[in-house]
Amino acid sequence: MSTLMSTYPPQVVTFVRGRGSELWDTEGKRYLDFLSGLAVTSLGHAHPEVADAVAEQARTLLHVSNLYGTEPGPEVAATLDRLLGGGGKVFFCNSGAEANEAAIKLARKFGGRGRHVVASAYGSFHGRTLATLHATGQPEKHEVLQPLPEGFRHVAWQDLEALEAALDPSVTAVLLEPVQGEGGVNPADTEYFAGVRRLCDERGVLFMVDEIQTGLGRTGEWFGFQHFGVQPDVVTMAKALGNGVPIGACWAKADVAAAFVPGDHATTFGGQPLATAAARKVLEVMEREDVPARARDAGKRLADGLLDLPHVNGVRGLGLLLAAELSDRDAREVATAALAAGLVVNGVSPSALRFAPSLLVDDAEIGEALSILEGILA
Ligand SMILES: Cc1ncc(COP(=O)(O)O)c(C=O)c1O
């Protein structure tokens, strides 16, 4: 009998080791990982340069708190700001939910009293803290935890009229994912994001983009919003930034970031040397390898291959964040069969399989994953 709380379904496999796109379980069985710990290990498992950077930092300085300056957080913030287009400031934290929590608090402080509502989309996922859960547009997840913090409103996804109707003077920010990840891998489009930007400008509302799943090359651009030719006011990220070392970040344009003054927000661990040393090396490797281009190329090969498989009705997503829509097959059962056959993917909905392999995945690994799936679907 496990002494872990039962917040997760039964875990049928225990992994003990990884390398690149490969994983091994306690029995020594090898798997191909096409989920990357839910879009986290974008450079693959046990990346040698990231491992060395973490080990070196562990031998140098792990933590002293944010009462004192440390390295290399400021360097990581500068790199992120450059990749995001410049002119912003960064707050570091430890997870995606915390990055969104920071964004929500910043939006409330920026809006002032009476202007505190955050509008987000049905089908979205923004985290599991009480506030980010309420921002998450999945009412069925809210019910058992009511009452949730006040100040959240949901609108239909990809529906500009619905958003316009929701933007009364109490709204301080709109929070959207460029591709709804947990909601089923549903990409936004240029018209929608451009329309949201226009509406936000007209109403003096912040446009906040949740790049926690989509950020850092995964979709074929450094950030998902960059597909749509808009510049947000606030961007949140986490997952891939540490390649498995917990770190999150909330970026905001400097005039928005200025709403926070000392004492408004804080975290013990956020920005500490261990996590930022990992992030510095992750960003260095990502830039050297041009991971957005690799995600575009590999994503096309994977999508083309999936479309040739039996029972695959369509493929959606951007770059290497893809979902295959299945006909006459339960995606969760297919994911279970794939795991038994040595391929890690997940059923993101009853009918769709999600793929988020390492951005360094090679052609042979894509071929192997496709042939495992073909064996299951045929
Ligand atoms: C878009 C998005 N936002 C927020 C989160 C929450 O991140 P975390 O689990 O690190 O708190 C996730 C996690 O899946 C996510 O996909």
Image: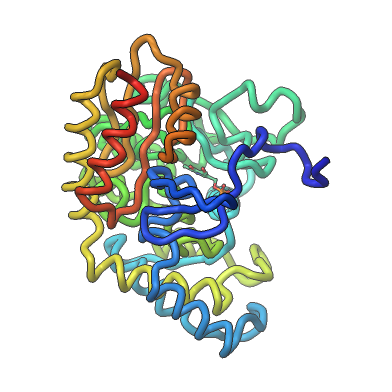
Residue 42, position as x, y percentages in the image: 37, 56
The residue sitting at 44% across, 49% down in the picture is 30
Say if residue 139 shows up in the picture: yes
Determine whether 57 is above or below 137 in the image: below
The residue sitting at 20% across, 54% down in the picture is 294
Residue 15, position as x, y percentages in the image: 56, 52
Quarter holding the N terminus is top right
Q: Viewer-proximal residue, 152 or 33?
A: 33
Quarter holding the C terminus is top left
Residue 26, position as x, y percentages in the image: 59, 52
Q: Residue lying at the far top in this picture: please name it.
A: 328
Determine whether 224 is above or below 167 in the image: below
Q: Viewer-proximal residue, 212 or 251?
A: 212
Q: Viewer-proximal residue, 371 or 20?
A: 371
Determine whether 154 is above or below 25 in the image: above
Residue 360, position as x, y percentages in the image: 28, 57
Say if residue 155 shows up in the picture: no
Horizontal side, residue 269 vs residue 287: left or right: right
Q: Viewer-proximal residue, 301 or 100?
A: 301
